[in-house]
């Protein structure tokens, strides 16, 4: 689809709508017709006549009167489709329904009616219909304490508020907002995944399944990793500095990004424990069982640190300020190898196993070195043996 083609988005200010609108803008789409509650029916009629593609995301899910389900879901959908037909507009229509459309309740029945209206519209006009029955969604900008347990858990824990886990074993099917938006943007060019088990419907992937208990455990772990007020509310103290599984596409990676979006604006930072002595300081930055530990080492002029070796633990040193010499000697030999390094020219120095090593500040200012180790330090199994270079 051309980037200048008009795109109608109902419910543009909602959770899905807001994320979709911002993605479309980032990708260069310039004619976004954003329909929200404050817009008039006349505007909806006019925009329906112009739209080259329709995202129908608007709906009602928690009304005061059950009748509002039908007004905001089925009736709004029928009006929108009527305006399209009056204008002779056969633009594709993408509709967000709900997995509850298969249930016998007012919300589900109103969604099922909206679905049928879209399929009937497709049959009458030939306009492509993309109907998605949405599972639970999560991601940035979702409203907490409303209808998303993920948003509620993330918001409450990040703000030091309690959460309730009534059934820890209850399983939730969840889809991440960026995966939703990816699918919806692809639909602009007709690239949709069709549901085989329910003909006519489209599906979203991947669907992550997690129990309430596991969800609460993960979110609390994110807070404990950062420390601060949120961790104190959970009985924690200094940050554990642990980062979650960040494998591409993993649920934990997506949940961690979601959690950070709920941080209070005065708590983006958190303190680290600096181990300070007359030589300088050593401060652990973050740790992960799968990806090791990152630390920052500061040495005063003339100071030598290290003089030890490892069997399996390996490290990478990156001097970011000052002048230093990193020295190596293979255990059992006499040859000393020297690597001059400087913050003026960033380069990584690998610390191989079986070599005793040290680092000396040979400059006139504090030496700052970023150090990565392939495993977090374990005082029970340090794999560190003193031996002068």
Image (tube, helix red, strand yellow):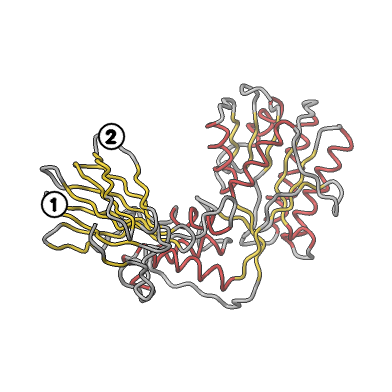
Place of residue 87 in the rendered image (x, y in percent of width and height, measured from the top left): 77, 26
Query: Alpha carbon of mark 1 to alpha carbon of mark 2: how far?
Result: 20 Å
Place of residue 333 in the rendered image (x, y in percent of width and height, measured from the top left): 31, 56
- SS at mark 1? loop
Q: Are marks 1 and 2 in contact (CB under 8 Å)?
A: no
Instruction: Say if residue 267 shows up in the picture.
Output: no
In this figure, which residue is indicated by the disc labeled 2?
Answer: 345
In the figure, residue 35 lies in which quadrant? top right
Instruction: Say if residue 221 shows up in the picture.
Output: yes
Nearer to me, 168 or 251: 251
Mark 1 Cα shell of 10 Å, populated few (<14), some (14-19), many (≥20): many
Q: Which mark is residue 280?
A: none
Mark 2 Cα shell of 10 Å, populated few (<14), some (14-19), many (≥20): few
In this figure, which residue is indicated by the disc labeled 1?
Answer: 300
In the figure, residue 278 lies in which quadrant? bottom left
Place of residue 5 in the rendered image (x, y in percent of width and height, measured from the top left): 65, 23
Instruction: Return the disc, 1 or 2, that comes first in the chain's sequence.
Output: 1
Residue depicted at x 22% and y 42%: 321
Residue depicted at x 56% and y 26%: 28
- SS at mark 2? loop
Nearer to me, 378 or 206: 378
Of the 4 image quadrants, the one containing the N terminus is top right
Whether residue 350 sits left or right of residue 207 in the image: it is left
């Amino acid at each position: 689809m051309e980037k200048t083609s008009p795109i109608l988005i109902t419910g543009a200010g909602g959770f899905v709508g807001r994320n979709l609108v911002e993605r479309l803008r980032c990708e260069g789409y310039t004619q976004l017709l954003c329909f929200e509650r404050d817009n008039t029916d006349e505007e909806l009629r006019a925009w329906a006549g112009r739209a080259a593609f329709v995202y129908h995301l608007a709906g009602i899910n928690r009304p005061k009167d059950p009748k509002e389900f039908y007004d905001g879901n089925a009736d709004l959908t029928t009006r929108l489709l009527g305006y399209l037909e009056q204008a002779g507009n056969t633009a594709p229509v993408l509709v967000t329904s709900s997995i509850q459309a298969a249930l016998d309740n007012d919300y589900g029945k109103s969604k099922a009616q909206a679905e049928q209206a879209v399929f009937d519209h497709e049959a009458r006009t030939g306009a492509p219909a993309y109907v998605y029955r949405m599972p639970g969604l999560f991601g940035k900008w979702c409203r907490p304490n409303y209808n998303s347990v993920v948003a509620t858990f993330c918001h409450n824990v990040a703000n030091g508020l309690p959460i309730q886990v009534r059934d820890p074993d209850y399983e939730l099917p969840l889809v991440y907002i960026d995966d939703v938006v990816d699918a919806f943007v692809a639909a602009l060019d007709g690239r949709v995944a069709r549901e085989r088990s329910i003909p006519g419907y489209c599906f979203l992937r991947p669907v992550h399944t997690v129990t309430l208990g596991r969800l609460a455990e993960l979110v609390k772990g994110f807070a404990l990793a950062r420390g601060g007020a949120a961790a104190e509310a959970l009985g924690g103290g200094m940050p554990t500095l642990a980062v979650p599984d960040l494998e591409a596409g993993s649920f934990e990676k997506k949940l961690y990004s979601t959690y950070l979006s709920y941080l209070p604006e005065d708590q983006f930072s958190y303190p680290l424990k600096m181990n300070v002595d007359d030589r300088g300081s050593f401060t652990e930055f973050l740790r992960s069982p799968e990806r090791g530990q990152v630390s920052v080492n500061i040495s005063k002029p003339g100071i030598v640190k290290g003089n030890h070796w490892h069997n399996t633990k390996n490290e990478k040193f990156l001097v970011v300020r000052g002048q230093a010499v990193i020295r190596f000697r293979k255990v059992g030999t006499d040859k000393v190898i020297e690597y001059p390094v400087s913050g003026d020219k960033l380069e990584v120095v690998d610390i191989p196993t079986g070599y005793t090593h040290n680092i000396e500040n040979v400059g006139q200012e504090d030496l700052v070195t970023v150090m990565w180790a392939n495993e977090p330090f374990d005082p029970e199994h340090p794999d560190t043996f003193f031996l002068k270079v």
